[in-house]
Image: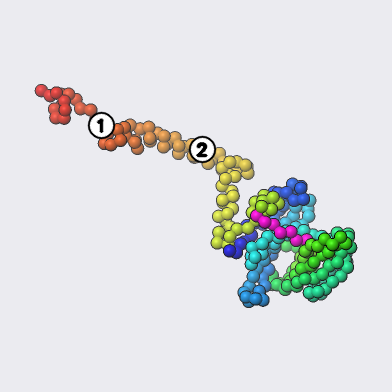
Amino acid sequence: MSVRGDLRVGETLRGSLRKKRRYYTVMGRVVLKRRDQGSRRFVKREQWRLIDDDGRELWLEIRRDTNKVVLHEPVPVQPAIDPLSLEVGWTRKLRVRGQPCTVEVTNVRRAEIDHETGAIDHPQGALTATTCAELRVVDAQGSMSTMVVDAHRLHAREIYCETGLSSSKQYKVFGRPVTRPWWIPGFVRRFWRWFPAAISGTNGSVWAPVFWIVLMFVVLVLAELIDDDEGFFPSGGGVPFRNRSVYGGGGGGVGK
């Protein structure tokens, strides 16, 4: 089942990364589209641009074809890498995070920029297509990591380190899941998150006291109706009983 990003430009996420509490502001989104070589169908990836409370840029990639969520964090590299010149098998000795490393290109993809939303920074100018390269980085101790570099968000002397985020990790890093099934509209999920917070007042919503006042009014009205002599539940369980006068004749009285 394909997933979609459950984010909104301008909203703030709260979570923990690298054992530090952080706030993230959602700045914008880029949707990339490319044709899968095996099935020949189009597959899409969402890349959401985030800015944390230290002013650092991060990207959240949502891969619709595999339902994976990947966090991209910028990593300094020297010298700079031009993704347009890369081919599979390209290998160089570079300094990554200031340490000597062997960098090898394992995959190169070309994709169309399907559309953009919000504030997206284009250091090299606006593009309609881009090139993305996956890198295998091995440091002097033999530790291996996966990183990416691409043309549409290329910053001087930076590549991106990839970290996969399971549902539990999404809760930890962002405070909630960041994806939704494709068949659930985004506004439904947003209402589902907003309503409990609104009625509890945890988000400072002005609707919390209104909700409780209306609820109390409904409870009082129901209580009044139930308490009425001819209310919902008459005594006796059947037709209400009415006592007759002993002088009225008929019934079981003692008439004259």
The reply to whether dot 2 and dot 1 touch (C-beta < 8 Å) is no
- The N terminus sits in image quarter: bottom right
Q: Amino acid at mark 1?
A: Phe
Rendered residue at 79%/62% (across/down): 145
Q: Nearer the viewer, residue 119 or 243?
A: 243
User: Residues under labels 2 and 1: Cα distance?
Assistant: 38 Å
Tell me if residue 117 can be seen.
no
Residue 5: image quadrant is bottom right
- Magenta residues (range): 161-167
The residue beneath circle 2 is 213
Q: Position of residue 74 (x, y in %)?
A: 79, 59
- Check disc 2 and report its element: helix, strand or loop: helix
Q: Nearer the viewer, residue 238 or 141?
A: 141
Q: Nearer the viewer, residue 106 or 159?
A: 106
Q: Quick check: 181 left or right of 58?
A: left
The residue beneath circle 1 is 241
Q: Is residue 78 one of those drawn in magenta? A: no
Rendered residue at 26%/36% (across/down): 239
Rendered residue at 66%/64% (across/down): 63
